[in-house]
Amino acid sequence: MRENRIIQKPESRVQKCGTASGERETMNEQTLNRVLLQGGTVIDPETLKESRADVLVVGGRIERVGAAITAPPGTEVIDCRGRHIAPGFVDMHCHLREPGREDEETIASGTAAALAGGFTRVCPMPNTEPPIDTEAQVRFEIRRATEAGYARVHPIGCCTKARQGKELAEIGTMKEAGAVGFSDDGSPVADPQVMRRVLEYCKAFDVPVISHCEVKELVEGVANEGRVSTRLGMKAGPDVAESAQAARDVLLAEFTHARLHIAHVSARATVEIIRWAKARGVQVTAETCPHYFTLTEDALADFDSNYKVNPPLRTEIDRRAVIAGLADGTIDAIATDHAPHLKGEKDAEFDAAPPGIIGFETAFSLGYDQLVLGKALSLADYIARLTVAPRRILNLPPALITAGSEAELVVLDLKAEWTYAPERVLSLSRNSPFLGRTMRGRVTAALLGDKLFRV
Amino acid sequence: MTRRLADSKAVTALVTKLASQIVRHNRGVKDLALVGIKRRGVPLAERLAARLSVGNNSRRKRGQSPGARGRAVQSPFSPIPVGAIDITLYRDDLQLVAETPIVRGSEIGFDINGKTLVLVDDVVFTGRTIRAALSELLDFGRPRAIQLAVLVDRGHRELPIQPDFAARTIKTERSDLVDIFLKETDGRDEIVLTRVGSSQKPEAKSQKPR
Amino acid sequence: MKLRSKHLLGIEGLDRSEILTILDQARTFRQVLDRPIPIVPALRGRTVINLFFEASTRTSTSFNLAASRLSCGCVNFSKATSSVSKGETLLDTARNIEAMGVDGIIIRHSSPGAPHFLSRHVKAFVVNAGDGAHEHPTQALLDSFTLREKLGSLEGKRVLIVGDIAHSRVAHSNLLAFAKLGAKVAVCGPPTMLPSDIEQYGCEVFYRLDRILYEVDVVNMLRVQLERITSSSFPTVREYRALYGLTAERLRKLAPEVVVTHPGPVNWGVEMDFEVADFSRALVLPQVTNGVAVRMAVLYLLAGGEQAE
């Protein structure tokens, strides 16, 4: 299942998803000088307002937003009746595997899959082989993304050299090369003294430290310690492994007056700690992932390693707490933690399978289903978690749907029911427990500058 | 079409006939033991054992000993040993049946070495049940001889196995069903033949309810 | 009759009537073991393999004997001598072996759910001989068989399981089996050796052995791994024996009808004193003999009859 690009003239590319039996078109790309998105409802997640409006984009910039715009000659008109138009999403936590594991994913295949999910910008984590801990590697990632021409990449750099958790990495020069945040994700920064230094140092560069909270000594295996792990005899780790470190980190952030971001929040206690910290004025933000508000540990009943993820799926109480955390703003953002793995590695007995779920192409639909249709968040608020919050946390430019701004938009069909079929997956890997699931709401197009991607 | 071949009185008579055949052939009951094949062979073997013991006693009363005169006879109060075997584990068709049959277990509470065993079953048909019983018995030891006693021989043998004693021999079609009912297992004594449409070949096992 | 599943993956998947069926058949096979020629031709032509990724002589030997007694072919695979150490996956190993033509795979593996995973990928029937800390169903079946033979029935009996419950697959399977057979189960061990939410099994929990030991009909002692005692779960062997061991002194105080079981191998002097070996109501050796009969019943019920699809 390799990406297969066909460069056609005039400026049209088809992103095909290859299967043994043949190839199907999943995403189609066109370079267009003039595009009119006609008849849709524009959502402005900054103001939380929706309004019927047409959007005219010329030369990659929004020329006009208003009612009933007439298309000038030579304009590609996209019928957006019944659809919504929103700013492009930003995935502030994902794994693109390049360099090192290009068999699992490349920057090109990953950014294409991201676009299909509505993410116009992504922030890949630095746990590649070798890890991203110097400016040269940051530049490498950005260059590969530019060559691919899909979603834009804003790398996260390691906060310690080689993610060893011992010495500070070259945070300053990495920031200047384009890194927007720092993390040893995949691993915690175990030594509190080192974490303190990382937080302090990052203050100079106004970047958040993204913390993967896990006290490794408490964790025997990648499952939530509790009723299900006991019944299945699985080695497990208690939720306090996450919340204890989150507690440490928010207190260190308070002490150092630095900016902290808690990654992939999965447990109720963690949500409560973040809530408490914010009330005290700590500069802390947080994210969670679709699997933590959609699934619980009960999904593990058949020892299906498709549900093996770190942090692990937890109880229904934790799931509800995560949703409540999103609803009251304790959790600011939704990220995917897109983590590709080969079938041959994932298709194994539970202990041997690597943890991780791919997520670009299902995130929007899962959130729409669980949070908006589930009445925890309004549509605009939900979209804000996907685009406004990550941009704010990482100091990325806001995506405004106003005249003069660069075009960075997604078109959403909220009424669509679609099935996540393996043949349509753009990522190189297929490790998702949602394969075959029918979901509501999907991204139908993304417009990035003068490039229109139809899904 | 169903036909009754024997009623309760007739069955009793058949059992008596079988008993006297056994005694005559063996010239008495010395070192004799009966082994019934589960299920209906077992109550049959028990009835035979009772008749053989009674016969033994009554002959003694009249001053005769079963078989040759002057020979020492068994004490009238030592009953003839009766064992029971379940041949399920020795069936030659175990791998062909859809569901694994329940094994009920065999109980042979005496040493079979050197004994004359009379294997008892209600019907002999293809002979495969008897073949299985023979294999199993020989795993218990080495009897001096094994003889076969059946209430009914209905023909259609698929193996070279013949009863030494058959109380009644009847001609049947391959597709016929011959059912023996015994008081101990079915509440009544009766032998019934049912003629089924010739296109139907009955499962071998239906002829050997165990 | 048939078991509902083609495989034996755990006690969790068996209902009470299926457990009783297995135990009833085991009684028949126990009789076979007493015959002069303790072999029957029931599974002639079938082959099973002991696929053991964790060391075990007792369990694999028991399955070996069970197969042989049924005239079933049996081959052995042990991790140490295999290419698994060269990085061959479980799935590859199993598929290669299946390609050689086995009807059944008896697997012991350190990962919970490995037998379940295997059953989804091979055509042979799968028997779980121990998967991590999850289940060891044939052990629970033979323990249940032994107790039923000795006590007549487990209905209403009080059973106590003592030891490192958290890491014991035997404890998990026994908890399920005894409960399904109507026993009232209690567990006893130090808090560091009791898993989260053990109460979901409906058992009572005791931290102090002497509080419960003299109120039960059956004492099911578990083997403690000595490495675990000296790690963070427990201070010393000496303290373990003093607080949780079936010492000679405790043995003397047991009520006259109480029976003692242990899955073996026994750490003499740790979880049980040597005196227990001579104790007339210790069922450790009968458990071993019964193990062969129970495993014969399992193989017979899974391998006999038409192979489904």
Image: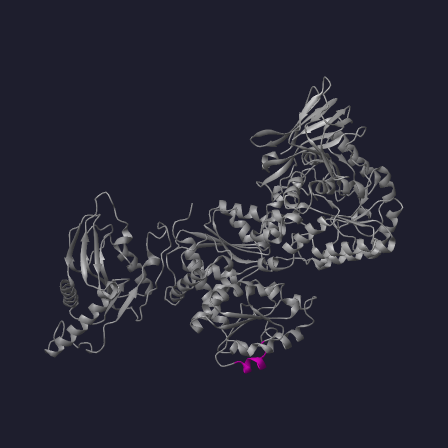
B126 sits to left or right of A3: left
**Is residue A271 within the magenta segment?**
no
Residue A39's place in the image compared with B157, above or below, is above
User: Magenta residues, as a range?
Assistant: C246-254
Question: From where the camera sits, is residue B41 visible?
Answer: yes
Quarter of the C terminus of chain C within the rendering: top left
Q: Which secondary structure dominates the residues rendered in magenta?
A: helix
* Residue B71 position in % (x across, y down): 15, 76
Q: What residue is drawn where x is 77% and y is 26%?
A: A64
Tell me: B174 left or right of A308.
left
Locate the N terminus of chain C by quadrant: bottom left
Q: Nearer the viewer, residue C121 or A53?
A: A53
Left or right: A400 as drawn, with respect to C32:
right
Q: Nearer the viewer, residue C195 or A36?
A: A36
Return the x and y of residue B62 as percentages of the image width and height. 10, 78
Q: Quadrant of residue C268?
A: bottom right
Whole-percent x, y for residue B80 in the image: 23, 72
The answer to whether residue A214 is visible is no
* Image quadrant where residue A252 sits: bottom right
Relative image position of residue A380 (x, y in whole percent) = 71, 40
Residue at 39%, 68% (x, y): give it: C34
- Furthest toward the left, the residue is B62
Front position in the image: C79 or A391: A391
